[in-house]
Image: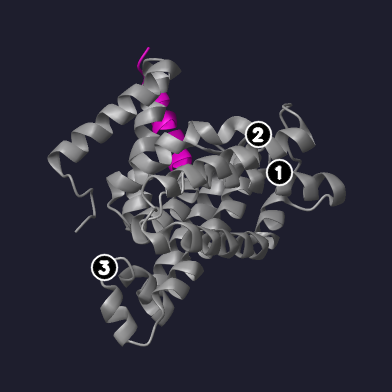
Amino acid sequence: MFTFDLLANAIVAGVLLGGFYTAVSLGLTIAFGRLDVVNIAHPAFVILGSYTAYMVNAAFGVDPVLAGLAFTPAFFAIGVGIYRVYHASFERRGDESLRGLAFFFGLMFIVEVALILVYGVDYRLVDAPYIGATVSFGFVGVPMRMLVPFALALIMTIALQQYFVRTFMGRAIMAVSQDRLALQLMGADPTRVKQLAFGIALATASLAGAMLIVIGPVEPSMGRLYIGRVFAIVVLGGMGSVGGTLIAALLLGVIESLTATFYGPSWAPAVAFGFLLFALAVRPQGLFGR
């Protein structure tokens, strides 16, 4: 039954969900949108971020978000290492299209199986004071477990956008897939730039994973649920556009929430991806694509 209260709550829930989708998609916006690296293993590393936050929270009682932030340097280092292997094995030889995709596909399963071997297939969750709390604004209830990730996603988006616009290395990352020769003439090594960018992309997975386990319990294979969504968001927002990723994620979140509320959860993915196809038919370069 349609009511204004139900509509308002569905929209708010969709906006909050879209904020989380933004956090998960930012790393792929960099890797796929800026570097042309089809890292389908990115959601698996988000789940790995969830489990690192769970491990620290369970052992030491540290807030999961702080744990995710503390592990970003480690994820950055992992990203740098992965890109070095990818570049030496595939990109330098021109085999990045199919064999490179297979590399990340295999990497996704390695991460998933490793988590299953260590933690099993049971769902894991964390404990924090704000999980379970709700803030009410009139007839609209805002769960803190969704509001905290939404606020963090906005901070991540603004920080990355400022880094890309205001720093030399940030502008180099934005340019590396467009004109390697011009970048070299400016004194930057394209391979090192892409290595740094991929490290940043994977570092975002640590925080996104912490947000995911704050929202709800996780298990090792959950990353598969987000592969289609994050690629859809990156393409819809415009390849490599941080702001476009935010807008596309919010749109997808609101559409999914409205569909799930008024027509049932099973319809949500179909309607959301139908909207994606329609939007790309009207504007193939994405909302903020060039």
Q: Measure the C-alpha gap from mark 3 to mark 2.
A: 36 Å
Please give left or right for residue 233 compared with residue 118 in the image: left
Residue in front for this viewpoint, 239 or 67: 239
Q: Which mark is residue 20?
A: none
Say whether residue 94 is magenta.
no
Q: Amino acid at mark 1?
A: Tyr
Q: Measure the C-alpha gap from mark 2 to mark 1.
A: 9 Å
Span colored in magenta: 1-18
Please give left or right for residue 19 compared with residue 72 in the image: left
Q: Earlier in the sequence, mark 3 or mark 1?
A: 1
Q: Measure the C-alpha gap from mark 3 to mark 1.
A: 36 Å
Tell how many labels. Answer: 3
- For the residues labelled 2 and 1, say whether their Cβ atoms are less than 8 Å apart: yes
Q: Which mark is residue 178?
A: 3
Is residue 134 shown to the viewer in this render?
no
Q: Which mark is residue 220?
A: 2
Kindly identify which residue carries mark 1: 51
